[in-house]
Image (tube, rainbow, N blue to C red):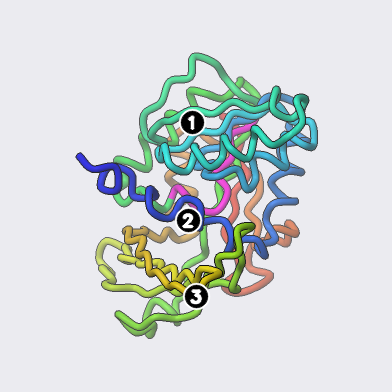
Amino acid sequence: MPEAERDQYALIAELYDGPYSARDDVDFFVGEAVAAKGTVLEIGCGTGRVLIPAARAGVNIVGLDISPSMLQVCDARIRAEPDAVRARIGLVTGDMRAFDLHRTFHLVMLPFRPFQHLTTVEDQLQCLRCIHDHLDAEGSLVLDLFNPWLEALANRPIGVEIDDAPDSTLPDGRRIKRRARVTSHDRAQQTNHVELIYYVTHPDGREERFVHAFPMRYLFRFEAEHLLVRSGFAVEQVYSGYDKSPFGSSYPGELIFVAKKA
């Protein structure tokens, strides 16, 4: 099977993080990792946007991702770090639904919504139970979801590109403009089929266009809580933002769970 078909991130791995440089979630996750006072597992670590700052802050952390292309970019970034930072990081290629690292962790965290790539309840439960098995007796989970915005779900036009993130520039001078569109919306399955479209302009003026297409399932607050409880967790906090504001204090806000292994 061609690499681009086997690994959906193969064509865009080096482009992925640029548009997210303005996200305000890194300090939150690094703070949670430091507070855990033990080894951390990040699921969906991608190219290291959260993983590397956590290691810089003194955290021993393992990053798991299903995409070899994303991990290749992450590994290159890690190799540019000082020896002490590199020594704190491990990388594993794996499926969040079925992995066995033969160890447990003080904290498992899923920054920036990788859980929503799981489109069936069976997959969601398999993932949460696998996480449960990899937590210490007093371990915690931080699960980051987007809070479904009802107005957008009802009225967002299908097939229309919208600005998705600020423009960014790679170190080699390539400029990235990213747009997004929903190509279909299955309300019964709570699933959007999404395209992220990368318009890349090279320093010599040459232009390229790359499309990253995937389904994404949205979950409502109490639906997610039920999944967590069914998987052996006790929900301790539900936040509306990375400033730890309580859920409901802003709309739509985020949907961030902190749960303990029950």
Whether label 2 touches label 1, CB < 8 Å: no
Q: CA distance from mark 2 to mark 1?
A: 20 Å
Q: Which residue is mark 3?
A: 205
Q: CA distance from mark 3 to mark 1?
A: 46 Å
Q: CA distance from mark 3 to mark 2?
A: 49 Å
Label 2 Cα crowd, 10 Å radius (few <14 / some 14-19 / many 20+): few
Of the 4 image quadrants, the one containing the N terminus is top left
Q: Which residues are magenta?
A: 107-115
Q: Quadrant of residue 244?
A: bottom right
Circle 2: residue type = Phe
The picture places residue 21, in percent across and down from the top left corner, at 65, 61
Label 1 Cα crowd, 10 Å radius (few <14 / some 14-19 / many 20+): many
Label 3 Cα crowd, 10 Å radius (few <14 / some 14-19 / many 20+): few
- Which SS class for mark 1? helix
Please name which of the two marks, 2 or 1, marks the residue nearer to the observer.
1
Q: Nearer the viewer, residue 132 or 8?
A: 8
Q: Which mark is residue 98?
A: none
Give the residue displayed 69% in from the left and 27% down from the top: 86
Give the residue displayed 49% in from the left and 31% down from the top: 131
The picture places residue 153, in percent across and down from the top left corner, at 39, 76
Q: Is residue 150 above or below residue 2?
A: below
Q: Quadrant of residue 203?
A: bottom right
Give the residue displayed 25% in from the left and 68% down from the top: 186
Q: How many marks?
A: 3
With 62 as the anchor, is 94 left or right in this view? left
Q: Which residue is mark 2?
A: 222
Work out whether mark 2 precedes mark 1 in sequence or the reverse, and give the earlier one. 1
Q: Which mark is residue 131?
A: 1
With 134 as the anchor, is 106 left or right in this view? right
